[in-house]
Every structure is written in structure tokens, then in C-alpha cells.
């Protein structure tokens, strides 16, 4: 798939570093664009997906001081794929540590899929630190959302071919709870089984993230190191229900952020995080700008969604 014409040109980061946030975890971050610019933090998906140079390109480098962060265990953060002391709440604390480390008072927060989950939770915990929210492919980590994509009877009806590959590593008798079955193997002692299951789990997500299956995305799922981090960390968070006390935690706390300027962008044909979650968030938060991108699935890289995300970032330059 050719890249979107809406993206800003490729750029290098002008700074990068490693922030030790606990005795165990050290996080990779980088800065690009204008060092004196308006800060924006990009929160990647998964969790466990990690950041890439592509992620710098949603933001005008003349205006934004763009910060990318590899969350615990993801990307270049270490220990790679570590699940120890890796929770939604520890990531919120990490984001605040990074903000203070970089001497930032307030910033625009940008996130898609799990990145939208983390962006929403961070904003609800620290509303005074968020200038605006740009959210894509809304994921609130409710049981219904997990069931739709990772258990029988939901997305499996749209991608039955890819689904058959996803269930292959799991014996029939354990297929009643796929997240638990994968969690047992992704955290087990058998390294070969961990890698095999990580690739199957990641291939299922990468095969369904776009309206038109993208072989480049699917190929990413066969990279052992990336697949292990992505699958282990995702499954760890889902098995633990996002570490939320209640299933609808994010919706229950929307009132804490309804005053914050925000744009919600949702692919109409998003099979990974179907439109119903974005629509429920929109109804609970009518002040936020909301748009379906009519020819898109889950990915931020589909042209309609990319263009709307860049437009949102351009709109918030004036804040
Ligand atoms: C709910 N998990 C999906 C997610 O957050 C995500 N982030 N990146 C991806 C792909 C690599 C599949 C595009 O999915």
C-alpha cells in the first residue's frame, strides 16, 4: 500500500534517550521536530507494539516537539517483552516521569487502539497535563471488546481464514477461553511454543488491521522479537482485564476529560476495535470531534484515517 500523501516527510529524531523508571524497567524515548515547539506525545498500540520513525510523521515538524515513547517491555525499552511490574497504571506513572524529565508542563496526547486506551486513562488521571487528545480506533478494553476479537463468534466471522491460523496452536478443549489458553503458552517455559504462539497471535492482528490485507503488516508478525513483545504484553494486559477495577472504567470516568479538546477518528470497517466502542465514547462525550473514516479499517496507515489524524494535529497547532 503506498504511504499517505497527508503525512509530513520522513525526519530523523534530534534527541533520544533511555529513562530508568524502576530498578527493572528502562524506557526508550525520542524527540523530533522543533525543540522549542509545542509538545505532543505519541502513545503506541498493542500494548507492546513499540514506536517507529513513521510515527513522527503525523505532526508538523516546524511546530511540534514530537515525543515517541516505547512503553514497558516494548520496542527498545528493556527488559524486552517483560511482564513484570507492567500494568496500565505503571505506564501512566511512566508518562508523568517522562513529562517531568523533559521539562514539559502540558502536551497534546495522541494514541490509537491500545494507544487510545492509554491516552484516555492518562488524561483521566492527569487532565491538567493534557492540552488535547487525538484518538484513533477506540479500544476501552472491555470484556465485550476482547470477546469480539480474541474469542469465537466475532471477528472470526469476517476473517475465517486468518482465524483458522490463530486457533491452530490451541487444542480444541482449551478454545473456550483463547486469551487464557494463549496466556498459558506465552508465559510458559517452552521457548519454541512461546514463539510459535506469539507469531500466531500477532499474525491474527496484523492480518485484520486493514480493510485490504497488507502483506507488509503481516510480515511484521513473523519477526520473533517484535511478535514476542507484542503478543506477550497484549495477552498479559487482556488476561488481567487492563488492570481496571470495573469493566467500563473509561466510560465511567469520561466526565473527567469532557472539557479537553479532542478528536476521535474511527475506521468504519475496523475489525480489531469495532466502531461500537468509538460510538459509545462519542455519545458519552459529545464535545469531542468525531469522524468515521468510511473506507478504512483499524490501522492508522490507511489513507482516510491518516489524513484525518494529520488534520487533527494541524488543528491543535494553535493551542
Ligand atoms: C487492541 N490491540 C490492537 C492494537 O493496539 C494494535 N496496535 N498495533 C496493532 C497492529 C500492529 C496490528 C497494527 O494493533
Image (cartoon, rainbow, N blue to C red):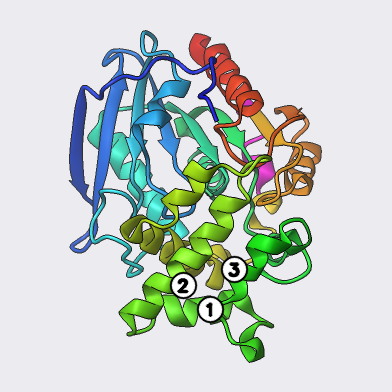
Q: Which residues are magenta?
A: 253-262
The answer to which of marks 3 and 2 sits earlier in the sequence is: 3
Question: Where does residue 25 sit, x and y in percent of width and height?
Answer: 24, 58
Q: Which mark is residue 144?
A: none
Q: Which mark is residue 165?
A: 3
- Which residue is drawn at the image coordinates 45% and 80% (left, top)? 185
- Which residue is drawn at the image coordinates 44% and 15% (left, top)? 8
Q: Is residue 19 part of the magenta span, yes or no? A: no
Examine the rendering and report whether any part of residue 217 can be seen.
yes
Q: Residue furthest bottom?
A: 173
In terms of depth relative to the viewer, which is nearer, 88 or 173? 173
- Quadrant of the image occupied by residue 132: top right
Secondary structure under tag 3 reads helix
In terms of depth relative to the viewer, which is nearer, 135 or 107? 135
Secondary structure under tag 2 reads helix
In-image side of 182 versus 284 (left or right) = left
The residue identified by callout 1 is: 169
Q: CA distance from mark 2 to mark 1?
A: 6 Å
Q: Which mark is residue 197?
A: 2
Task: Say if 289 sits above or below 221 in the image.
Answer: above
Question: Where does residue 235 sit, x and y in percent of width and height?
Answer: 50, 68
Amino acid at each position: 500500500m503506498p504511504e499517505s500523501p497527508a503525512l509530513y516527510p520522513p525526519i530523523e529524531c534530534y534527541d533520544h534517550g533511555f529513562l530508568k523508571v524502576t530498578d527493572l524497567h528502562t524506557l526508550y524515548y525520542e524527540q523530533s521536530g522543533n525543540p522549542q515547539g509545542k509538545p505532543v506525545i505519541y502513545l503506541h498500540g498493542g500494548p507492546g507494539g513499540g514506536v517507529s520513525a513513521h510515527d513522527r510523521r503525523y505532526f508538523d515538524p516546524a511546530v511540534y516537539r514530537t515525543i515517541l515513547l516505547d512503553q514497558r517491555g516494548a520496542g527498545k525499552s528493556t527488559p524486552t517483552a517483560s511482564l513484570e511490574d507492567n500494568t496500565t497504571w505503571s505506564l501512566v506513572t511512566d508518562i508523568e516521569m517522562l513529562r517531568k524529565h523533559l521539562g514539559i508542563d502540558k502536551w497534546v496526547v495522541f494514541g490509537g487502539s491500545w494507544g487510545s486506551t492509554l491516552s484516555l486513562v492518562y488524561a483521566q488521571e492527569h487532565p491538567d497535563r493534557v492540552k488535547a487528545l487525538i484518538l484513533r480506533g477506540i479500544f476501552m478494553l472491555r470484556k465485550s471488546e476482547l470477546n469480539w476479537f480474541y474469542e469465537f463468534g466475532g471477528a472470526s466471522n469476517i476473517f475465517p481464514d486468518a482465524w483458522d491460523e490463530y486457533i491452530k496452536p490451541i487444542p480444541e478443549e482449551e478454545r473456550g477461553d483463547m486469551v487464557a489458553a494463549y496466556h498459558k503458552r506465552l508465559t510458559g517455559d517452552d521457548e519454541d511454543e512461546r514463539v510459535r504462539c506469539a507469531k500466531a497471535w500477532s499474525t491474527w492482528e496484523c492480518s485484520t488491521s486493514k480493510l485490504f490485507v497488507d502483506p507488509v503488516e503481516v510480515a511484521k508478525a513473523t519477526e520473533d522479537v517484535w511478535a514476542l513483545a507484542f503478543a506477550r504484553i497484549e495477552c498479559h494486559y487482556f488476561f488481567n482485564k487492563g488492570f481496571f477495577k470495573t469493566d467500563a472504567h473509561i466510560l465511567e470516568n469520561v466526565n473527567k476529560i469532557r472539557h479537553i479538546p479532542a478528536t476521535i477518528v474511527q475506521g468504519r470497517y475496523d475489525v480489531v476495535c469495532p466502531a461500537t466502542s468509538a460510538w459509545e465514547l462519542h455519545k458519552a462525550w459529545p464535545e469531542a470531534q468525531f469522524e468515521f473514516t468510511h473506507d478504512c479499517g483499524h490501522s492508522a496507515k490507511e489513507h482516510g484515517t491518516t489524513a484525518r489524524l494529520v488534520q487533527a494535529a494541524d488543528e491543535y497547532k494553535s493551542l
